[in-house]
Image (cartoon, rainbow, N blue to C red):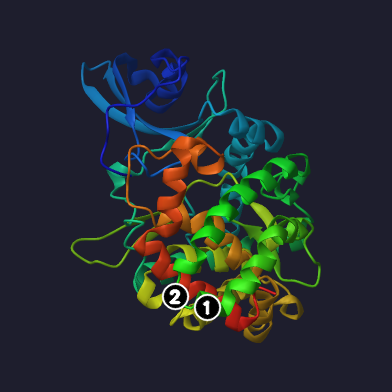
Amino acid sequence: MSEEISSVTLPAWLKADLFEKLLNERFGNRYVGIKAFKPVAGLKPGENYSTIMLRLHFEVELKDHAIENVSYMLKTPHDFELYREILKKNNMFEVERDVFLQVKPELENMYKDVGLDVTFGAKAYDIDVPDNYVLLQDLGPFGFKNVDRLEGLDTAHTKSVLKKMAQWHAASANRIHLKGPYTQNYLQPTYADTMKENIEQVAETLGKYLLKCLPLYEGFEEYSEAVHKIQPKIVDLMYDMNKPDPEDFNALNHGDCWTNNIMFRYEGECPEPAETYFVDLQLPKVACVAHDLIYFLLGSTKFEIQLSQFDYFIKYYHDHLIEHLRLLKYPEAKTPSLRFLHTQLLKYGRVGYHTVLILCPPVLLDRTEDANLTDFVTESDNGDGLKMAMYSNARYKKHVSAILTWLNNRGALQ
């Protein structure tokens, strides 16, 4: 995933013997035991705010005295009270494990049944541990890596993600058509109704900094009034998406599709990705596909193509969506036209402001070891400097000035 950093706070429960059964199943009667175990940070400092991501290195001894090197990726929660409360009420880790262990294989098998090999992400594993966790195959040894979030995705990488997103949306929409709604976990919003007061506090805190820095953004006079009007309503507007409108084209959204949650594999010296995998699937929800599209395109692409190529990227996504819906024999009458998809993007333009407020600040901030979730979402002396840096740095101002102007001109801030 990234260059390894050895200094990381490890969960007290993380012991090698928790993985004995998993490794025994992997190597069968060749397995003797774990010779060495070394957990290290899986991401650079400042690359992940919401969870602890660890790369677990094992030296496994086999019966022929050979030593096999094995690694996994382990995600666990921070010891931050508000975040753990959100986790508890939303079952995020349980949901993500279920997506990797049940939902993802089901969608992949739908394509296998029609003769197409599609893989959406890493393999997941089930172990018995005393805390929330997600344990995944380490994609690093297979050549997968992230693109630098500060650079953003170029056209080739963006198209690769949009094709995989179209395949995911097509399969999940067809699964809903064939089997009915997903379980309640995937119909829940990003945050449960019981967390609305907490989410409003977070949005209010972040909104203060965005509004304070607004005069620093180019063209702010044109959209200032609209931003001031939508800011106090953004949580209600996003919660309005909790119940999918049956008139929309709905599918299981990734829910948090941005640069660090996508990995790419390359062949030889070719700079274009040969394979694209989704990672971090803890916020899936059944909703209009406009959510994933707006969130991804405004939060992850290079500045030069972010808005100038937006309609082209939507056409590219739509072409692949239609292709895969037809392959899966999804009803033609329910298949969305390109024109209809654009009406969906206008209808849910609010997601664009949500992206500017929540996603873009950490994505566009220079790396710093001091960045942490607590200072990002709460009022604190330490957090003041972090949030001011997020909302006032040159990169954020450049992107957001253009995005807010574009959203305002589309009527998306109304």
Q: Is residue 27 placed above or below 353 in the rendered structure?
A: above
Q: Position of residue 26 (x, y in %)?
A: 40, 28
The N terminus sits in image quarter:
top left
Task: Label 2, secondary structure: give it.
Answer: loop
Residue placed at 27% from the left, 33% from the top? 5
As drawn, the residue found furthest toward the left would be 269
Q: Position of residue 155 (x, y in %)?
A: 36, 74
The residue that disc 1 covers is 405
Q: Left of 278 or right of it: where is 337?
A: right
Q: Quadrant of residue 217?
A: bottom left
The residue that disc 2 covers is 218
Q: Position of residue 185 (x, y in %)?
A: 72, 44
> Viewer-proximal residue, 130 or 237?
237
The amino acid type, in three-letter code, at marker 1 is Thr
> Viewer-proximal residue, 267 or 194?
194
The amino acid type, in three-letter code, at marker 2 is Glu
Give the Cα distance between marks 1 and 2: 9 Å
Q: Quadrant of residue 333?
A: bottom right
Q: Can you see residue 382?
A: yes
Q: Is residue 282 placed above or below 130 in the rendered structure?
A: below
